[in-house]
Structure formats: C-alpha cells, structure tokens
Amino acid sequence: MKVKVISRSTDVFLRETKQQIHKVFRNYDPDLHPFETAREYTRALNAVKLERVFAKPFLGNLDGHRDSVSCIAKHPKQLSTIVSGAFDGEVRIWDIPRRVCLRQFVAHNGIVRGITYTPKGLKFITVGDDKTVKTWNAAEPQLGEDEEPVNTVLSKTVITAISHHRQKAIFATAGEVVQLWEESRNEPLRTYQWGVDSLHDIAFNMVEANIFAACASDRSIILYDTRDNGPLRKVVMKLRPNKMAWNPMEAFTFTCANEDYNLYTFDTRNLNKPVNVHMDHVAAVTSVEYAPTGKEFVAGSYDKTIRIFECDHGHSRDVYHTKRMQRLTCVHWSLDNKFIISGSDEMNIRIWKARASEKLGPLRPKERNALQYAEALKCKFASHPEIKRIKRHRHVPKHVYNAQRELRTIKEKEKRKEANKRAHSRKGTVPHVPERQKHIIKEVQ
Amino acid sequence: MGENSDFEFSDIEIGEEQHKKIVADVLSLSKSQHVQKASRTEAALQISEFNLVKSVTDRKPSVHVDDLAKVLKTRKKHVEIGKKVESTKRRGRTLPKPLEKPQADRIKRSVGYEKNRFLLDRWEAFVTSMRSQAHQSFPLDAVEKLKVEGKKAATFLDTLTYKSKLQKELEKIDTEVEEYHVKPNTEENEVSLSLEDLKNNRKELAKLRARQSYKEGKARRQNKIKSKGYHRILRKERIKNKLKEFDELQKTNPEEALKKLGEIEKARALERFSLRHKSTGQWARSKQVRAKYDKESRQVLAEQLQISKDLTQKQTTNSDSEDEVQDIALAVTEPPEQASNTPWNIALQTKPNEVTSFYNAFSQYAVDQTVPNDPDLNITCTSMKYKEKLDKPIKKARGKKIDLTMPVQSAKQIIDEEMIEQPAQFTQNFTRSNDSISALTNILKTNTKQTKSDVIKQFTKPTVTHLNSTRPDIIVSVENVPEASQNQFISEGFEDFGIASDFMKEKKSEIEKDRPTDIDSNLPGWGSWAGSGIDPKKQKKRRRFMFKMPKTIPRRDDNKGRLIINEKAAKKVAPYLVSDIPFPFKSAKDYEASLRAPIGNSFVPELAFRRFIKPTVETKMGTIIEPVTTGILMGKPNK
C-alpha cells in the first residue's frame, strides 16, 4: 500500500545553479492567509522603522568660501555644476560629485547679491552691491588668461536680485526699481516702479515665462508682465516676504518664504487669500525653492534648519539640520529631484538627499520592488497611530524644540483669548478669521 | 518832416508780407518764447522736461481747417468737401481730459492682470490632472527612445536574395533541412569573365558562406546545449506537434488515426513491460533510502515489488473466457506475443521513448476532453451495467456498427491503486482485453469496406459512460446521519461534567474581579488613637472618607448568557487602532475593506502586486526635469 507522506526532497526547493532564481511556492487562496492584514501591518511597521534607521540625508559639504554664502545658482543643463556667491564678493564654481571648487574669483566689491545662469548654461550673470551687472563665461578661461567678465554693466540704481527668463535672452533685476534687461544691451529695456522704495527678490515664472514677481520691502509681492503691461497686481501681507519661488509644473502657483515663520502658497489668479499656509519653522524663512516635479518645495530658515514641504500639506515632511549649520541663506533642489543644496552663514554649501532614507544609485529589480512595496505599505497604513508616530518622529536641535514649545503656547494663548472674547461679546462682533486670511492685508490693483 | 517823409517813404517801400511779419512779431512780444522747440535727434526712452514747449495749437491754432477749405472754392467738388469739413467740425466734440496718472495706471494694471489671468486659466485642466494622477513619471516627455536593433549581420544577409522562390517555399515546408548547393558555373567559367563579374561572384559566394557558417554555428550551439530544461521544452513541443497531427488525422483519416492510436498504446504497453518503472518512482526511492533502517518501509517496498511481479505475470496469462467483465481502461494493453505480430511494432521499437511520452500527453488530453469524472471512476466500476454496455459493441462490430469509444485511461493510477484493491476483478478485465483487441483488429479488417464518414462519426463521438463509484456511497452515508444541533451534541457529550454550571461560576468570578473596590481615603492611622484612657474598641469607624462603589456596574455581557466579554482587552489594543476615518474614505466600512485587501506578492499575483506598488512619482536617474512649456497645452511634447 502506498502511503502518502509529507516529505520534501532538496530537489524541490534547492536550485541547481546560482543563476537560477529561487522557486517560490505560492497559493493565493485567501483562505490560506487568514492573517494577511496583520502581516502586512507588521511589515509596514518594520518598513517605517527601517526608513528612520536609514534616514541619513547629509551627503557632504563644499567648503572654500571665506565669507557667508549669499546665493547659489544651478547649471540648467548639468546636474553636477553649481555656482555660488559670497558676502565678500567671491564667486566659486563647484563640481558636486567630486566636491571640488573648479574656479574662484572675486566678482564684485561687496556682497554678491544674485547669480543666474543663462538658459543654455554658457554664461552666468552676477549682480553685486557695487551696482554692476557682470556676465561671465561658464567655461574656464584658457591658461594664462585672467578671470574677466564678458560684459559689465554699470547700473544707475542698486541691484539686489536677478532672475533670468527661461528661454529668451532677457533678465530682470530688482533693487530700487525693477529693471528688465536684454543680454546684449547695456541699458535696461524697461524700468518698472510702483510706489515702493526697494525690492529684494525677483523670480521669473517658468511656465508662463512672461510673468515675473518681486518681493518688495513694503511687505508686498508684486506681479509683473514683461510685455507692455508692466506691473499687474500687488498683494500686501502682514510681514515681509523674503523670497519667492514659482512652481515649475503649475503656471499659476508660487510660494513665498515669509518673515513670520510661515510659507504661503498663492494662486496668481486669486491673490486675496493664499491657497495654503505652511508652518513649522520657528524663525524667519529666508529661502524657498521648488522641486522640479512641482510636488514639493524646500525652505531654509533663520532657525538653522531646512524643511521639506509637500505642496498640499500644511506641515513639513522632513527637517534637516546639523550642529554646524548656521542661518540658511539659500536652498536649491537639484534638477533630477534627488538632492538639496543649501548655502548658509558659516561659509559652507551642503548637499543633502531630497528623501532622507532613499538608497542612491542603481537598484536591482528585486531591491526596487521591495522598496516600492515598503513604500506602498507605509502609505496603506499611514493613518495607524503607531506608524504615524514613528514616521513623524524627528530629533530637532534644542533651540528649535524649545521655540516650537513656546510658539505652541503662544498660539494656544491667542486662541483661548479669542475664544474668550467671542464668548463675552455680542454675537457676530468677533468673527472667525481663517488662518489663510489672517496674514494678508490687502490685494492692490 | 524829413522823418515823416522818411516814414512815408518807408511805408511805401515795405511790402505786404513784411508788414504782416512785423505785425505778428509785435503781437507775439507779449508771449515770450525764448526756447526753441525740441527737435529729436536720437531715440530716447525719456523726454526731458526741460525741452518741453508750450503748445501753440491749443489756444490759437495757427492753421485752421476752415481756411484750408476756403481755398478750395473754385471748383464744385471742392465746395462739397468744404461743407463736409464744416459739418464734422460742428458734430465733433473735444476729447475729455485724460485721467489722472495713478488712476490711469490702475486701470492699465487691472486690464493687464485680467489678460494674464485669462492666460493662466488655460492651465487649469492640466494642473488638475497633474495633481490627481496616482502615478507620474518625470521628465514628462519621457518616451522610450530605445530601439532594439536586430542583429545587423543577419538582417543584412536577409536582404540579399540568392535563393529562388521555390527554394524558399521548400524551406518553409521543411525548415530543418538546410542544404546549400553551390553550383559551379561551368558554362560561365568557360567564358572569360570580366573583373566585375568575378568580384560579384566572389561576393556572392562569400555571402553564401557567411550564411552557411552562421547556420552551422547556430546548429552546433543548439546541439551543445546540455540544459535539461531546454530539451524538455523541445520534447514537449514535439509532443504537442504530434498531438496536433493526431487530431488532424482523426478528422481527415480516421483509419490512420486508429492505427496510430494502436501504435501509441502499444508503445506504452511495451514501456510498462520493460519493468523499468518497478522501483523508480519518488516514493519507491524514498522507501529504499529508509529500508535500511525501517522495517516497515522494507515491508512496503517488498509488497510493491510483489505487486509488480504479480502484475507482469498476470498480464502474460491468456484466458479465453469471453463473457466476463471487462474494463475499458485496460482494453488495450496487449500481451507481447500479439504485439510483436503487428507490423507497426517495428516502427515503435525505433523510438519508444518519444512515443511513450507522446502517449502520456495524449492520454491526459483524452481524459480532459472526454470524461469529466476522475479516472478512478472508470476503474472502480461495478459489473452489471457494464456488462451490457460492453457486450453491445462486440455485437455491433459484427453488425458493422461498432461503438468505438475512445479508450480512456490514465497511466499510473490504474496500476497503483485499482489493481491492488481488486485483483480478482482485474484479472477478469484482462481476460476481456483480448477480446477488445480482436474486435479492433476486426474493425481494421472490416472497415476497409466501410464508408469513411461512418468511421469518423464513430471515432469522433465517443459515448461517455458515467459509472458508479465507491465515492458516492460515502457521501450517502454522511447524508443519512440525522441532523442535530451543535448545542445538542455538546450538551450530550459533556453531560456528566457539568460544564455549563462551571462556566457560569467562572463568569461570576470574572464579574467580581472586574468590580471596582471601595476607596478608602482616610489618612492611615488617623482616628485610631492610642494612649492612656483610650479604649481602642470604643473608637468609631470613620466612614466619612470612604468612597463606595456601586455593587453592580453594567457590563456588556450582562444579558449575553454564556459569554464573557473582556472589556479590558479592547483597551489594550485601542492605542494601536485608527480612531478617525482618514481623508479620502467616507465610511469605516470602506476603510476597513481597503485595509483588508492585501497588496503583497505573497497574497496577490505578481502583476497585481506590481500595479499596487507603483510609486506615485517616478524619476529617471541623472535626468534633468524641465518645467512644463505652453506646448504641452497643444499636445506637443515638453520641449
């Protein structure tokens, strides 16, 4: 009689050669997997823990500047090249993968206020405190040649910021007035002034490239049109916007980094109310830059931290800091959506991963699948408290932690006070003002 | 006087025009205009305010249109023009004063803003779609530009034609035969060839050689492949082809098909006879391993061997009793003597392995096609019905109408199981088998006269017989058991143990345990004084700071009878559970369903898994992601 027994020979589950893949026996019958949800939950928990384990975003720094870094520009066609300007007027060109400085020269007397590459990346333009606009060759000079600008323009007014048109040979500068320049001409094409004494930042829209916006010292953001219209509209806020960035995938969205610790995302078509308020910083936000996918942006702050926000979320996804990093002056998101570059007060340029726990370099298919699965699981169980807690958990510097607590108390106090006021006054006299409207004073035509 | 005369003289001398000029000069003395009107020499953005001149035209225009029109009185046409001018002058109104500059600017700004807003509105749809997409890959215009190029040499050679059409056709028919006949051009050789012709010839020959060597190389490589898997695939393909052939043959030439079937079965029989399968199965091998140490397995193995021996012996025996029960499944296994008589046996001997494997495949195929039941059912049949059915075909055979049911059998099960259980029946079956074979041979003889269509009908429409098996009996026995509730069973089973009362006791104690005790908030020692003149017995018990708990607290299992609900257990899990329904979901039910659906590849098929884990944003390593351009609104790539 033949008796069937459970027996396994090694032939069944051992592979003959190394090249063969392992046989995996699966039965998808749900009756055989009564604990599938529980198992996946455990996997998600492990995945989220591993994410925290592997979260090591700092990649390296570029040191060489002898004064604080004031501005950085990315090369539009090369991922490896950036150019940075410092407060002592020095400009340096860096090779990121090798972490070396390729060129260095003093470009301006005083601070280098702004740098921008031309669209094809053949030249870059710097503006400084010495009222000059200098154009430089992106290529290194020949042996024996001096570092000399291709073109120098003496401006009549002080210039504090520069932004280049995405395609045309046009750039705009901000300062006492907004000026529109053509690369080949020494006189500004146009000069716009709208009752403000100074402007400190300017940015061209990357999608509808004829529109640009400037941050003014009267706490306003002004929209301009390069065509004959000139200034279009102005929105005045309670505190000064320091910097602004346009979304590269959405023509009408821009975000401004504000002095009141928040960032505001605006829809250009409806300026009287920001679309979103992004909180979390505990000091003035000094710089902001969008990811090339337009889904996220990075902000650097005076509180010595970098925070990454998702466009549609009010709170940051991640916070980066190191003990030695001081006040941030500029942040940039690399054009391949992988890295973040930050310049700060203590003369260093730092390179970070855009996603802290991401594995860099090519992945084998199995590895990629596993990572993607982990990501999907985290997403699936995202609202489970344990997973949420671990995912959100961050160590922040003591001063940030304390400031957060303080701010929380202040906010609670204000809320309580308002509630009390409302409770003790006639109905309707103390209206509810949504957070999004609190910070806007008016929209000026 | 002299002055007067002089004056008069001068009065006469001064002409009309001069006089007029003098008058104009005198008149204009009051309106001093020292600065000349600016004349433009160079293009400038700003006009200097120092060069501005008072406009002479607004107060007292130097040129009147009327005056111009008056000049034209000489002609009739011109008079009309003059009238027209006058009428327009009457109707025309002076333009209003331009707006104040701030106001004008504001209007300009708002108009410009509206214009741009309209431009930006065009993006609404695109932005919405981008935001709502579950999966996105950047850069946006990333179209796979990789092209898999075929082997250049091969394609190049394919373009050259050196084969005739006929040859190509022939190759299609029989692709395995590859022969290249290179004819020496004897005739042409005789004729002196030109240099070009020679070159061409050489080229062609070279091409041919290249092709040939390529093919040869390929064949050599294929021959060298040792992989079992590869050969297995080849073999399977060959078998499949044969099956297909057989199928076709069955349709077109049933006689031939029948013959072939016979062949196949013959081959199988021979294979089984070779005694190669006596102790080669996995089971037998594992037993052999154990046999050394295990008595039982040794015994089992011996038993198995005995069986096989019996089998072979019994197969060789010939019995001539005709009226005994026969089993279809074994109808074909012929004794070797008879088999050797048949002419197609020779053919079989040449390639036994392939044919057997083909047979195995075929039998599986046949089983699948004809009989929905288990193969066991055929074997464990009981006698009576069968007898009738099987008798008929023989009669029919004599009457030219034979029921040629496809002999359905499965390879191993028959021998492994059935024979063991019913050896007697088996022998009977075998005695019958000869008959069937003789019947078949009869058919072969008689059918030569038969019409083809008849045969086809018989062959292609096998009558399926559903047989009673032992299995249903078991089911029946189960059905016959009187139905009883589970509670009854339990109560009957545990009658003696008093389990119900025990449970109630347990529940009571559980309730007691969970009941909160009274809280005594008296200070310890307060009121229990000691000392002279104090009688500790007389001291009052202080009840003032005692918090009494209610004796009964509502529980969830109060009215549930035989059920204890542990309410504390839920509290432990609570912090790990989701308290609110997360955003896109509207009901807890939906959310739970989404959690319940697994996404891992241990629970769902690979393709679904891939779909589930697709990341929301994909980027290409080392690729610059450009911002969108207006071209994308027109459906152009983002460039």
Image (cartoon, rainbow, N blue to C red):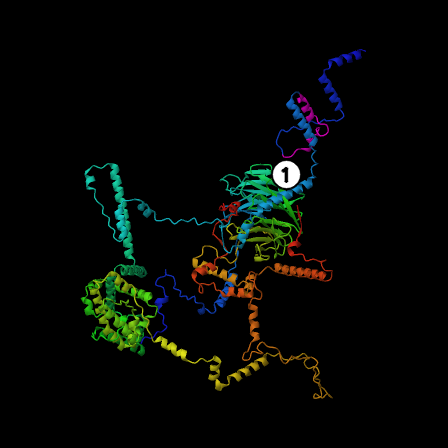
> What x and y, as percent, mark residue A158?
63, 42
**Image: magenta residue range:** B45-73
Magenta-colored stretch includes residue B49? yes
> What x and y, as percent, mark residue B199?
26, 39
Q: Chain of mark 1?
A: A
Regarding residue A349, the answer to whether it shows in the image is no
Most extreme residue toward the right is B1
Which is more toward the observer, B495 or B517?
Answer: B495
Regarding residue A3, the answer to whether it shows in the image is yes
Q: How many marks?
A: 1
> What x and y, as percent, mark residue B466?
33, 71
Q: Quadrant of the N terminus of chain B?
A: top right
Picture layout, residue B504 above or below residue B250: below
Picture layout, residue B184 above or below residue B173: above
Quarter where residue B389 is shown:
bottom left
Q: Amino acid at mark 1?
A: Lys
Which is more toward the observer, B610 or B481?
Answer: B481
Mark 1 burial class by Cα count in 10 Å: few <14, some 14-19, many 20+ = few
> What x and y, as percent, mark residue B384?
29, 76
A209 to the left or right of B388? right
B230 to the left or right of B34? left
Magenta-colored stretch includes residue A379? no
B102 to the left or right of A249? right
Local SS, label 1? loop
Which is more toward the observer, B632 or B561?
Answer: B561
Quarter where residue A17 is shown:
bottom left
Residue assigned mark 1: A156
